[in-house]
Each structure stands twice: as structure tokens, then as C-alpha cells.
């Protein structure tokens, strides 16, 4: 991992996969949320999902720290069933009993231009010739695997590990585990390679270059972040900028970002 002193670190803009997804989807909404701190109301349902997701992630972290879970799981049989089912499935797929290094809530960061790219891996498994990123998702497995492959969480997490370790891209993979009662755990695995790494590098440099220009215009000339060319047909936030009254529920329903609700705790800039 790159060593960045604290004073220099503080001068960089921190970007996680959440910000990159939103910046690519809707620059004006990025401006609204992260520069102007204007958030939309969060529904009780989303709050409940976030609370459950946080609890689940904490339990998995405790497990991989070898801390006891019985006192928590014994009072919540539904949660106990899904945790036990997941651990059984993960162990079968990744052979956790092997002599490998494992760390839950493992953080990685990389300085790139004016930005500090950050990621928190739910679980990182390191072997001599292989590195595996595991991520827990508390919703159903998506039907469109390509969509998840193109999400900045997948791209950034794999990219950061390749850039901050001695592993070749071909030695790195990322597996999403989907947990949703009453369904059995499911997973999607993404293998990495040099071609994908080069592609992500170009996409990231383009996105950050755009952000440099947006911030320059915003700070020096008071010019708002621009909409995408296809914004009207592809952005779930479009109507909220061009109508006096927007339907927040419709925005949430159509936004990919809200399907990744368990990643909200990683937002920082």
C-alpha cells in the first residue's frame, strides 16, 4: 500500500466506489450530495435494511476475529440460520481451513492525482499465489452479472489490490456473496486480468480528469457540474433537477445506488 503522510493525506479528496458510481451516473447529484451536503430523505425501509446490513457485517467481522457470536445469534434464530449457512458455503467455496492469511474489514488506499482512492474489503484472503476479495451483500443476487461487473465497486476493489500489492491481476479475484432470508447464499465470482486492469485504469483516469475540470469550474467560476449527454434517458435523478416536485420514491426505486444500500457506510469525501 502506498505510504502517504497524514498532512498530505488530509489535502486529498477521498473517493470510494460509492462516489465513483454516482459521479459516473450523475455529476450534478454528486455535486449536490458531496459538495453541497444536500441529501434526500431516507425511507424507514432503507433505514431498516441499513441497520440489518450493518449488524450482519459486524457479525461476520467478529467471526473472523475469533470473537464469540452465540450471545447474539441465540436471540435471533433467523440471523443465526443465515450466518451459519453463509459460513458453510463460503468455507466450501474458498476452503477457509487452509493456512492462509485472512482479515475482515481490510482497508486499502491509493493516491492518484488529487484523490485518495479508498476501499474496505469485507474479507481479504491471501495465499502464496492468490488473493481473494470477498464481499457480503444483504440482498438477492442480481440477474444481470454484467451490470455488477461494470460497477465501480468491482472495478475499484480489484484495481486497488493489483496496484497496492505484488500480486498480478491474474492472481486476484473478487466474490460477492448474496444473503437474503429465506434464500440460500449465492455467489458471483469475478476473475481479474491485465486487460481488465488496463481498461479500468483508463476509465478511472478519464473520470478523475473530468472531476478535476468540474471542480475547477465549480470553485473558480461557480459553474455547476454538467449533466451527461444521455442524462434524460438514463439518469434516475434527472427529473429532480428539472421539475419543481420530484418523486423521491421513484428515484430510489430506479437507482442502482440504492440497491447497494449496505455500502452507504463507506461514503466519505
Image (cartoon, rainbow, N blue to C red):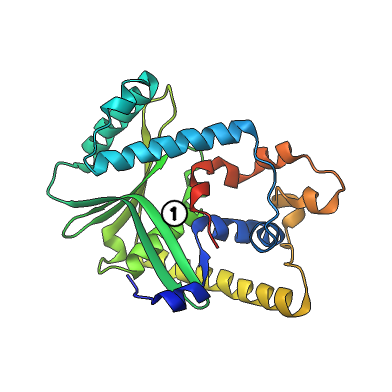
- Residue 182 as seen in the image, left or right of residue 41: left
Residue that appears at 25% across and 31% down: 88
In the image, 202 versus 226, the foreground residue is: 226
Q: Residue at x 18, y 56 (%)?
A: 127
Quadrant in the picture for residue 37: bottom right
The quadrant of the picture occupied by the C terminus is: bottom right
Using the rendered image of the protein, determine whether residue 83 is visible from the camera's viewpoint: yes
Q: Does residue 257 sit above or below 15 in this rendering?
A: above
Q: Is residue 51 above or below residue 181?
A: below
Tell me which residue sits at (26%, 60%) in the image.
171
Location of residue 96 (image quadrant): top left
Residue 90: image x %, image y %? Answer: 27, 37
The location of residue 142, given as percent across then percent down, is: 49, 38
For the N terminus, the quadrant is bottom left
Looking at the image, which residue is at 64% across and 56% down?
25
Q: Is residue 18 above or below residue 69?
A: below
Q: Which residue is mark 1?
A: 154
The answer to whether 171 is drawn above or below residue 223 in the figure is above
Instruction: Report the side of 48 relative to 163 (left or right).
Output: right
Q: Position of residue 31 (x, y in %)?
A: 69, 62
Amino acid at each position: 500500500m502506498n505510504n502517504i503522510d497524514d498532512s498530505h493525506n488530509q489535502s486529498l479528496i477521498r473517493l470510494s466506489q460509492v462516489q465513483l458510481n454516482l459521479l459516473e451516473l450523475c455529476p450534478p447529484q454528486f455535486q449536490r450530495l458531496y459538495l453541497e451536503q444536500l441529501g434526500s430523505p431516507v425511507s424507514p425501509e432503507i433505514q431498516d435494511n441499513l441497520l440489518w446490513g450493518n449488524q450482519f457485517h459486524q457479525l461476520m467481522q467478529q467471526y473472523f476475529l475469533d470473537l464469540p457470536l452465540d450471545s447474539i445469534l441465540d436471540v435471533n434464530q433467523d440471523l443465526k440460520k443465515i450466518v451459519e449457512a453463509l459460513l458453510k458455503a463460503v468455507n466450501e467455496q474458498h476452503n477457509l481451513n487452509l493456512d492462509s492469511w485472512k482479515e475482515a474489514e481490510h482497508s486499502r488506499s491509493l493516491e492518484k492525482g488529487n484523490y485518495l482512492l479508498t476501499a474496505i474489503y469485507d474479507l481479504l484472503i491471501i495465499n502464496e499465489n492468490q488473493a481473494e476479495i470477498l464481499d457480503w451483500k444483504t440482498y438477492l443476487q442480481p440477474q444481470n452479472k454484467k451490470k455488477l461487473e461494470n460497477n465501480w465497486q468491482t472495478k475499484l476493489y480489484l484495481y486497488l489490490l493489483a496496484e497496492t500489492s505484488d500480486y498480478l491481476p491474474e492472481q486476484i479475484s473478487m466474490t460477492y456473496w448474496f444473503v437474503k432470508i429465506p434464500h440460500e447464499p449465492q455467489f458471483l465470482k469475478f476473475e481479474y486480468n491485465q486487460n481488465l486492469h488496463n481498461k479500468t485504469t483508463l476509465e478511472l483516469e478519464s473520470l478523475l480528469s473530468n472531476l478535476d475540470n468540474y471542480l475547477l469550474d465549480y470553485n473558480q467560476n461557480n459553474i455547476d457540474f454538467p449533466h451527461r449527454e444521455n442524462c434524460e434517458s438514463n439518469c434516475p435523478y434527472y427529473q429532480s433537477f428539472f421539475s419543481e416536485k420530484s418523486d423521491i420514491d421513484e428515484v430510489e426505486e430506479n437507482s442502482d445506488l440504492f440497491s447497494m444500500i449496505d455500502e452507504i457506510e463507506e461514503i466519505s469525501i
